[in-house]
Amino acid sequence: MSTTTPARVTANRRNTPQSAGPRTPKGKASFDRLSRFITTTMRMSHIYQPLMLKTLLANGGRASRRELAAAFLSEDESQLEYYEQITQSMPGRVLTQHGVVVRDGRSYELAPEYSQLTAQETGAAIRLCDEALATFKAERGKKIWEHRAPGLGRMPGKLRYETLKRAGFRCELCGISADERALDVDHILPRKAGGRDVLENFEALCWRCNKDKGAGDDADLRTLRTMHAARQAGCVFCDIPAERIVAQNSLAIAVRDRFPVTDLHTLVLPARHVPDYFDLVRGEDKAVRDLLEDARRDIMAADPTVKGFNVGVNSGGVAGQTVFHCHVHLIPRRAGDVTEPRGGVRAVVPGRAIY
């Protein structure tokens, strides 16, 4: 792929020092230092350093953040793939239907009847396109690009970063990495269904999975809101006194176990009445996981003697579940708390812990 910087970058090009006159020993020494930095000193975790230097060099030593961003975008395969799909599914399809363009494999060309335009006519047509763009931008403003961040509105950069970091910079549906395909940060429970702009309600999705999710999601959002509010009369975990709650988020609660196996034994459970762990929806699963991590951190801060944890779920009566509201056990472990810890959760079946 071409690495030429965008035209608007080079349009402001100043005279470079090399073009000002004969090279001096000082200039040669500067070039040698820069060459050594690029070939020897520079350590790359991504393509950005050489691209930034290249853009600055091509632009006479100076470039705005927008110009540098345009240079990065020109090399971003994940973004290019996204706009290739946009080309095919939106303008390419519509203009082909109107007979203005013709598709030829992976390329497009003007319909044959427009192949004989004069230079003057071509220029006039380009100006008409510019006018159409200017009018549309004036009318729509930033709404033009809302399809790239559905429903998010303004989102703090740190919250976006934490969402992507938690996902390992991979799509949480298909697993593709951010290097291969652009990632969006998406609401799990949509704003229209009462979803809040908090970390546990965000997920990282590649643009393709996010698009497919939006196109195929025909759930009645009113039923989602009702579902998350579901409680069952008589369930000990549906009516937990506020003083027992040690932590919570929008979809899950953490409490201390009333019959602890070890000190600070904690239960994390969905706020909604869900009988079985495998009945949790994705948002609840993530909310429970977030609280498990928070509880683990808080327990270790409160008691430095805690060196490990058993994390377990009883799913079904034959597995020992007695309260049929899903709950996850977080059991702190300390050195010497049992004679033989080897095998851990395998001890739920007698004689199977040691192997």
Image (spheres, rainbow, N blue to C red):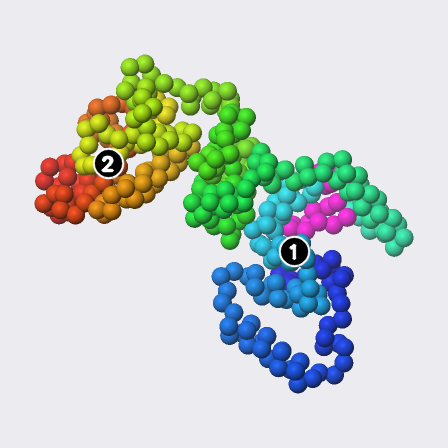
Tell me where residue 169 appears, x and y as whole percent: 46, 49
Instruction: Find out whether residue 98 is within the magenta segment.
Output: yes
Comparing 287 with 259, the one in front is 259
Numbered mark located on residue 88 in the image: none
Mark 2 against mark 1, which lies toward the viewer?
2
Residue 314: name its quadrant: top left
Indicate the amino acid at tag 1: Arg
Q: Which residue matches tag 1?
A: 65
Task: List the single residue furthest toward the top.
Answer: 233
Nearest to N terminus: mark 2 or mark 1: 1
In this rendering, does residue 184 appear at all?
no
Asked whether residue 32 appears in the rendered view, the answer is yes
Which stretch appears magenta? 93-110
Residue at the image position 69 percent from the left and 64 percent from the top: 62
Which residue appears at 84% of the width and 47% of the height? 127
Image quadrant in which the N terminus is located: bottom right
